[in-house]
Amino acid sequence: MSELLAVENLEKYFPVTRGLIFQKEIAQVKAVDGVNFTLNAGETLGVVGESGCGKSTMARCIARLLEPTGGKIIFNGQDITHLGRKEMRPIRRDMMMVFQDPYASLNARKRVGAIIAEPLEVHQIGSDADRKRRVQELLEIVGLSPEHYNRFPHEFSGGQRQRIGIARALSINPKLIICDEPVSALDVSVQAQILNLLKDLQRDFDLTYIFIAHDLNVVRHVSDRVMVMYLGKPVETGSRTELYAAPKHPYSGALLSAVPIADPKLGRARKQIVLVGDVPSPINPPAACRFHPRCPRFVDGVCNVDEPVLTPVPGSTDHEFACHFPLERWPMGDDELRHEGAFSREAAPAAAVD
Amino acid sequence: MTQFLIRRTFWAAFLFVAASIITYVLFFVIPSCPACLAAGKAATPEIVARINHSLHLDLPIYQQYWLFVWNLIRHGSFGYSYVTGTPVRTLLSTEIPVTASVVFGGVILYLAIAIPTGVISALRPRSIMDRLGMVFVLFGISAPSVWVGLMLLYLVGFRLGWTPINDYCSPIPTHQLGNCGGLWPWASHLILPWITLAVGSAALYTRLIRANVMETMSEDYVRTARAKGASPTRVLIQHVLRNSMLQVVTILGMDLGLLLGGVLFIEIVFGLPGLGAEILQANGRFDLPVIVGITMFLCLSVIVFNFLVDILYAWLDPRIRLT
Amino acid sequence: MALLEVQDLHTRFRTDDGIVQAVSGVSFELDRGQTLGVVGESGSGKSVTFLSVMGLHDKRQAEMTGSVRFDNQEILGLSTNQLRHIRGKRIGMIFQDPMTSLNPVKKIGWQLEEAVLIHNDVPRSEARRRAIEVLEEVEIPKAETRVDDYAHQFSGGMRQRVMIAMALINQPEILIADEPTTALDVTTQAQILRLMEKLQEDHGMAIVMITHDLGVVAELADDVVVMYGGRIVESSKVDDLFVKPEMPYTWGLLGSLPRVDVDVERLEQIPGQPPSLLRPPRGCAFNPRCAYTFDRCREELPELRPAEGKNDHYFRCHLDEGDRARIWAEKQAAMAPAGAESAA
């Protein structure tokens, strides 16, 4: 398996300015602050986190829709971090993006055929007739009918529009597709269709995915490896089986235990880590460990003084976490809890079921 | 807030200077001979040359400009009319009240028409009231204000004789012979101009208010208010109107600034001695000091009203932070 | 006698494209202190049903028939003036997006006080005191100062707490929550759901939890109602719905959920999309998407009937008990292969 993408210490800071006549930078929004990972061809990396964690900004940096303020992005062996528009152009043939909002990401004034053919046009691939054939082929691949070629986006449902977006991303046979919350805006029954489609396409066309979502269920289903982000930094990464079976970072634990389970008995019996307070602003992240103000395992003098670095879990090849006092077992024991922030529900008496 | 004020004052000063320079430059680009016009028909070349000199028109532009600025800073004076010799300041002080009366009276009238009409139309879309309102709007936007003014003047002023057809009266009673004064004479001279102004603008504002109110009514927080058990009146007044007026306020502010210089058609039709009439005359006579004076006053009014609108907007909408 | 009894509710909207049959014959009961989960996707009619109960539709466009009895009083068809004594006082409602559901130009405190003053003849100072008290109850820190803040100064989770506070300030008997956590992050969702549980314990009100998330329903509800195409297609006690769901749509819903505790190679997918309510399909609304459909499904709308041997589990399907039991057993086997891990 060859390495397709390597991200080293990626940083994206946005300036906050203030000034009378001339704007002066007084602070920075550290949207992405030190992300490291590698991605092999054919793999799917799931990126999970909540508002303000920087996952979308990171995606846009990798796709070079934004220019990073620090760090390196090496795609297919080439350093693309600071390439200009012209130099990026051939590289963009190998990297496409699928977006969250199926209503906003398609140009309402263009017909579906034109939307899907646009990447082919931009990269000047094929003649008009070739492109038309390719678009019809793509429409079938994503489960739409070739006669939809001449319709407009508003004539389709959300799920269908997302398929159009995927067809567009596939049109030039990219190597990497970055999916930014592709199913969040869809109904549950339609989500499954799109997730299955994405998996099928990966197998058929040898695609590599970066899959960004806030829904842990969804991420687990599609990913080989998962990265959990908090306030611009990854706090834990690992294979999906390891990370979900035994999360080490208290934030991963909180995320995992917060997901409602579609099983009343399991749901009632389990222990939940309920965090206190809100995600702080990325303009003024907390000192040292960014999670320390909300952490149920916080230790004064350590967590607010020394920033933890990603360290591997003993005995594991790719499970890493950044925490001074990782969870010892999963589900979290009551003795591990030091502060308010864990919630244990009384297991309800098992209801009689026939 | 202080930062905002400082920055705004700085820009205002800058704009003033720019406006005056541009006016000067434009003036001198146009071939003209103000001295000839000032001197009159029977002037000889020597008289014209003498007037040229006394008006400093033989100096280079930048020197004339400098004199102007110096005069302004030192004496607070805009200079003297080339033609009549009256201080521009005096002209301004008599004409501004006239234009202001027309504008403010007209604005109050058209808001008084537009707000109720707009709100009712929004509350009862597609009803008879709404459709009548839209017809009125169509008329108001299409009919040129000059035509409306002349029609009113002829029908109401002349045929029916209900209002005077010319001139302006100060609202303050005066006992000078030849000048009229008093609140009633003032209003009766302005009724028709006010109606003329209102017809055009009320239409626009009715449409605007109708659209804004309809949009606000479908907002989620209005639904929340209803879900709380608020009566329809309370929902309308406390939640809908306040929020839908925000946009109206912005546009009104800009309008006021511009209207002060834009009612010249009305002033001419009704024979009102306001800024519009004056600047038209001054342009024809190449009367630079008057032109510059009025231009700068208009510039000032646009700046001031925009400033007031920004403040008002920030006061009304707590999400806005003035920087 | 139930606190809220809805019988054969129909809600139709007159639109430019025709008549939209949003709710077609919904009936259910809500008892004091009960938590009812209402599950459905877009176009299921779940939100419209409860907006109809509250009378919040535009009367010019919406036509409602049937019966809605609250505390033994018929409230469907009452005028706004009569309904508003119930809204916000005996039945409270919260909505999905707390940012747009709060008035952006009025202080939070003012909006909370308004909720009190509309229904109680008390001085403003008393209303303010109650506002602060209820903000503390929903765990907003520094309530005495935050009461003078505006909506945009709160985070998403905090805003939803404010909404809950506003709905509960008059101690209603029912709280209707329309997708209250859909727009929130998952950890914030957990906070809000725990808060709602606690408030229900303290106040004893009934909760209607409208959501598309079966997980939320599993955690919170006592009884569940599944809606599709404007009708109830299944209703039961919550445990029962997940153990033995009785009709294909519910099977499909459960099967299409990715789970953190269960490993599947391929999710069960329901083909197609939710039906158009302008031109609803004949017969069973789900039949165009159903893998088990047969002729009768296309012709005849199935009635809600009780499941074999259970008196509180109803469903709407033409398939007989034998077929349904067999299909469900097959699906269950497919859904829990090796690698199933418990996250409990």
Image (cartoon, rainbow, N blue to C red):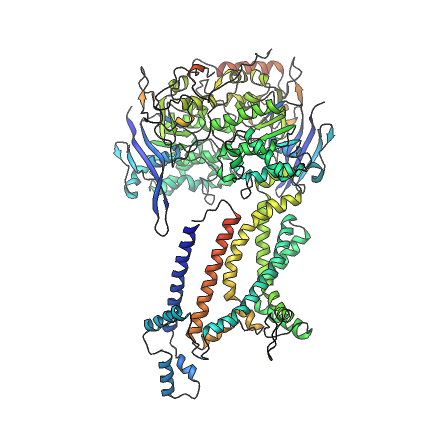
> Looking at the image, which is closer to me, A260 or B69?
B69
Q: Which percent across, then down, holds residue B60?
A: 31, 74
Q: Which residue is situated farthest in the right direction here?
A: C73
Q: What quarter of the picture does the C terminus of chain A occupy?
A: top right
Residue under the image location 57 percent in, 53 percent down = B208
> Looking at the image, which is closer to me, C262 or C150?
C150
The answer to whether one can see residue B300 in this image is yes
The answer to whether one can see residue A174 in this image is no
Q: Tell me: residue C329, above or below residue B18.
A: above
Asked which quadrant contains residue A43, the reply is: top left
Q: Tell me: residue C340, above or below residue A202.
A: above
Q: Tell me: residue B246, above or below residue C22.
A: below
Q: Which percent across, then down, holds residue C232?
A: 63, 26
Q: Is residue C10 left or right of residue B14?
A: right
Q: Which percent across, then down, holds residue B75?
A: 40, 71
Residue under the image location 43 percent in, 16 percent down = A332
Q: Is residue A285 left or right of residue B133?
A: left
Asked which quadrant contains residue A311, the reply is: top left
> Looking at the image, which is closer to me, A197 or A263?
A263
Q: Is residue C241 left or right of residue B63?
A: right
Q: What quarter of the picture does the N terminus of chain A occupy?
A: top left
Q: Which percent across, then down, holds residue B198?
A: 60, 62
Number of on-image labels: 0
> Looking at the image, which is closer to me, A179 or B266?
B266
